[in-house]
Image (spheres, grey):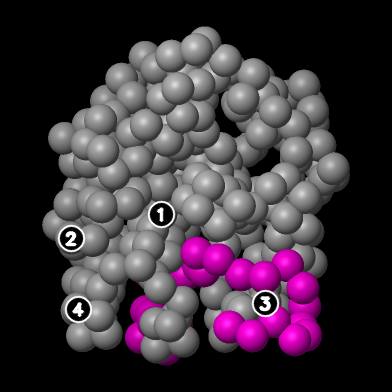
Amino acid sequence: MRKKIVAGNWKMNMLKDEAKKLFSEILSMSMESSDHKITVVFPPSIYLADFVRQNNGKVMLGAQNFHFSNKGAYTGELSAGQIKSIGCDFVLVGHSERRTLFMEDDQVLLLKIKSALESDLQVIYCCGESLEEREQGIYINKIRNQISLLKTFSTEEMMAISIAYEPIWAIGTGKTASPQQAAEMHDLIRAEVSVLFGAETSENTSILYGGSCSPTNAHELFKCNNIDGGLIGGASLEANSFHAIISACQ
């Protein structure tokens, strides 16, 4: 059975005391992660080591970014192995902000996923289309192309990869894909994974929705058959709203 996952991506938010307070509140509210349902927090990496020590097992921790090399002269970077060595379990790869603001292309993303898997980290791989691509009617091909990057990996490796569908036009804008729009894209993604890896692997791949998911719309989104949770941005920066979304994911 594929896992239900609710992940909070804090991006570049929160000073130290604010971050510690929020993480403590999330820990006090969350149920312990299980084989069926996982809560993941992606804080700024500067806080990860402290949060690993503070963690009581109710959530898992992950890094928003890392370099694909294991070590070397890459000033300011950190590796997947370093992230794993401090006790983290997850990494994000392919977020639209990394693709557009930092020009990470398919080759970089492929190397990142390989590095993460070699370090025994679980990957949440992000895909999504812009408003222009949706309005031009090319969004389906865009998602198919992004998912096709995964064909390099084996069915065994896919067990450590989840996919997050993020309509770029809904990230941080307050706009949300309707349940029908979200369901269409999640159905498409699962079908594409089935083509690449077979029905069994597809059915065991968690697919998350990201794009202004909130306590208001989480129930309707999570009722869709192929939506297995959410990659939450702004709503993960407040403990009560994040907890409400976690609770909505059954």
**Label disc, if present, on residue 18 of the rendered structure:** 4
User: Residue 199, relative to residue 15: is it above or below?
Assistant: above
At numbered mark 3, what does the secondary structure look like: helix, strand or loop?
loop
Numbered disc in front, either 2 or 3: 3
Dot 4 or dot 1: first in sequence order is 1
At numbered mark 4, what does the secondary structure look like: helix, strand or loop?
helix
Numbered disc in front, either 1 or 3: 3
Question: Can the viewer see residue 63?
Answer: yes
CA separation in Å, label 2 and label 3 = 29 Å
Numbered disc in front, either 4 or 1: 4
Q: In this figure, which residue is indicated by the disc labeled 2?
A: 238
Q: Which residues are magenta?
A: 51-76
Residue 70 in the image: state x and y as whole percent. Answer: 77, 78
Q: Does residue 72 show up magenta in the picture?
A: yes
Q: In this figure, which residue is indicated by the disc labeled 3?
A: 79
Q: Which of the 4 image quadrants contains residue 120?
A: bottom right
Q: In this figure, which residue is indicated by the disc labeled 1?
A: 7
Residue 145 in the image: state x and y as whole percent. Answer: 70, 28
